[in-house]
Amino acid sequence: MAAKRDYYEVLGVARDTSIGDIKKAYRRLAVQYHPDKNPGNQEAEERFKEAAEAYAVLSDNEKRARYDRFGHAGMGGAAAAGGFDPSTFGDFADILGDLFGFGAAGGGRRRGGRAPTRGADLRYDLSIRFEEAAFGATERLRIPRLETCDTCSGSGSAGDGAPKACNACGGRGQLRYNQGFLTVARTCPQCGGEGTVITDPCETCHGEGRVEKERTIEVRIPPGVENGSRMRLAGEGEHGRHGGPAGDLYVVLRVEPHERFLRDGTTVFSAVSIGFPQAVLGTKIDVETLHGESPLEVPPGTPAGKEFRLRGQGIDRLGGGGRGDHVVRVDVDVPHPKDLSEEEVELLRQLAELGGQSVRGKVLDRVKKMFG
C-alpha cells in the first residue's frame, strides 16, 4: 500500500493556512475530481476521497492539532493504517450539498415535507422626473405578484384531505443513487422535493396554493434620491408557500434628465449667457434654480466660463442634513455681425481701434458684401 500523503500537501496549502483558505482549497479539488465529472476514472475517485479526508481533519481544530503533533498516527483507525476512513464523510456532508446539490447518505439531511418557504423578492423599475427626485413624490404602483389562494387558503387541495406521501420517494423528497463510492440523494422529480403530493388539487390555483394577482401600493419617494437608488418595501413581494413569509419589493429609480439642469449628488449645475458689455462692466441677473429665481451679481471683468455658487439652492441631502448648492457657469454671448446694426458694427470697430486692436479691414463693408 502506498504511503499516505501529507494532508497539507493533498490540499496544496501551507501548514499555517487559515480554515477559510483550507475550505477554498478543498472546494476547488472537490469540483475538479468529483465522480459526476469523472465517471469511471479510478484515479479521480481516489483523489476526491483523499481531498475529502484531508479536509475533514484540517477543518476541525482539535483533529488538526492532533495531526500537526502526531501525523497520521494520531488519527487512529483506517487513516493511521494508511487507508481511507469513510467515517470522515459525516463531518462535511453540508459542504458537499453546497457544492453539488445533494446530500451524502447518512449525512443527516432533513426529510422532504411541505415546509414553509419564503416568497420571492420582486423588482419594479420606476421613472421619475428630475424635480420629483429633488423634492420627493408619492407614486401609486400596480404590482403583479403571487398571493395566497383564497379558495384553498394556500393548501393547494380542493377538499380537507391532507397531502399524501409521494410514492416515488416514500415521502423523503429525495431519490438515492449509487455514485461511485458514494450513495447520493437527488430531489425527487415527482413531488419536487416536497415529499408529498396533492391528489385533489384546488381548481383555482391548480394545487400551487398561490394565484397571480395585481396589487396597488402607494410609495413615498424621499427628497434627494438619485438615479439608480433602490427602495426596499418589506413584505410586498410574492407570498410564501405553505404559510411562509412574503418576499420584499425593490423599487429601482430612474431619474429622467432635465433640459436645463445637471446634477452631481446634491449640487445642481446650469449655465447662463450675458453680453460682452455686461461681462466687461458687470451686471446683476436673475438665475433660474429649482427653488425659483435667485439674484446673481456678476462683477466687472468676468471671463467666459466663470462659475458662481449659490449656497443652499441645490438638492436636499437624502435622509436630512441640509441642502446642496447651485453652481452657475456664466457664458459670454458673442454675436454674429449679421445680427448687429451698422451703428453697432461701427462702434465695435472704434472700440477695437481705441484699444489698439487690429481688425480685418472695414468690418461694416465686409458685412455688407457678405449679406447684400
Image: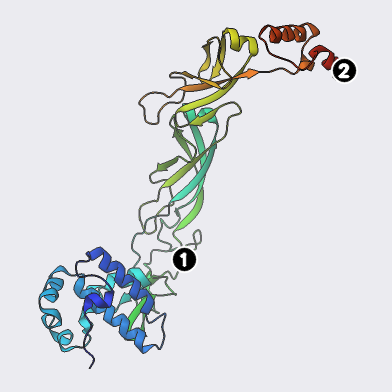
Q: Amino acid at mark 1?
A: Pro
Residue shown at 35% from the left, 26% from the top: 321
Residue shown at 41% from the left, 85% from the top: 39
Residue 5 image position (x, y, % from top left): 23, 83
| Quadrant the C terminus occupies | top right
In this view, 215 is above or below 283: below
The crowding category of the residue bearing disc 1, from other C-alpha atoms within 10 Å (few below 14, some 14 to 19, many at least 20), is some
Residue identifier under label 2: 369
Instruction: Tell me: 284 left or right of 116.
Output: right
Residue 97 image position (x, y, % from top left): 33, 71
The alpha-carbon separation of the residues under discs 1 and 2 comes to 91 Å
Q: Helix or strand or loop: what does disc 2 sit on?
A: helix
Residue identifier under label 1: 201
Q: Helix or strand or loop: what does disc 1 sit on?
A: loop
In this view, 262 is above or below 337: below
Looking at marks 1 and 2 on the same chain, the residue that comes earlier in the sequence is marked by: 1
